[in-house]
Image (cartoon, helix red, strand yellow):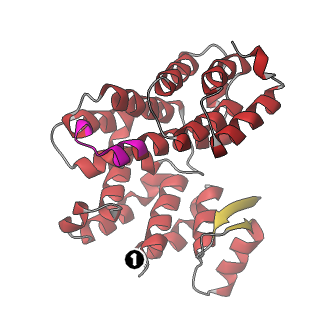
Amino acid sequence: MIYKVFDKYNTVVTVEDSDIDAYIVSGTEIKREIVQAMGETHNEEYLPYLFPVLNHSQFDMRSEAAQSIFNINGEMGLQELKRREEAIDESELEHEPSEKAMLKAMILRIEGGTEAVKKYFLSDEGYEIVKYDTPFCYRSGYGFKEADIDLLCFVLEECQRKTPRWLRKLSKTDYNEMIYFTLESIWFAGQETDLLKKSNSILEKRICDILQALLEQRISNNSKEVIAEITKYMRKECAKKILFLLKDNVKGDAKRAYKQSLKLWGIEEDELQ
């Protein structure tokens, strides 16, 4: 398998299974791209190589290790994730990005499932930064299930309703970021599973309704770009509804993604109505 990941310079590089094997044999210091690629494999045999990276001196390496452990098998890595979370001072929760908050969000998802995450998200108790980080756990390489998409839809619906008080207190920047990263997580699920294109499913209609509602409010062009990308992984009938709302409502990268989706589906703009 070939995995597209980021190196320490944030440059996209490719890693193959043979590269991971070569690292293991070499005994050299692990690189960021190897940490990410291990998470993409879902191979539980790599967990022992990732656990020590949770204590790496660099934040991005610790973060990537936690994500890869979460992707591979959160339950098997739970005790190591909890040990790292407990070692971080509470004061670290006062700023974003927060390693402790992300670990708490992962641990909540592993231990309590998606229903526990929903309950915590709506609660007036607990850490707001952990609630904010809920969708950030779902990155490329995670083994998405329907319950995870349901949770991401729930987050977007609550962002629109702004029912919890903590959501109403978010700055415009933080609010837009939460929308963007939740949509991005759904995009990852579309790329890596067939969950978004299951014929006539309740989930499909729900996603379509959510995207339509988002496009009827003022959201960032970056979020529109991700919505355009998501349409590539939906069924054509639902994609057409979303593309119609994007028509004449996108610019820059969002327009590029919109045009790409039209081409993918073989749709002319005058068909959108």
Provide residue 128's location: percent of width, then percent of height: 23, 47
Residue at left offset 43%, top offset 60% = 77
Answer whether residue 43 is visible to the viewer in this image: no
In the rendered image of this protein, does residue 63 appear above or below residue 143?
A: below
In the rendered image of this protein, does residue 132 appear above or below residue 82?
A: above
Q: Mark 1 — residue?
A: 55
Q: In this view, does 16 lie to the left or right of 210?
A: right
Residue at left offset 30%, top offset 57% = 101
Instruction: Please give the range of residues in magenta.
Output: 167-176
Q: In this view, does 207 lie to the left or right of 237?
A: left
Residue at left offset 48%, top offset 43% = 180
* Secondary-structure class at tag 1: helix
Q: Which of 172 and 112 is in front in this view?
A: 172
Answer whether residue 207 is visible to the viewer in this image: yes
In the rendered image of this protein, does residue 4 appear above or below residue 107?
A: below
**Majority secondary structure of the magenta segment?**
helix
Q: In this view, does 70 lie to the left or right of 86?
A: right
Q: Is residue 266 left or right of residue 165?
A: right
Provide residue 190's location: percent of width, then percent of height: 64, 37
The quarter holding residue 31 reads bottom right
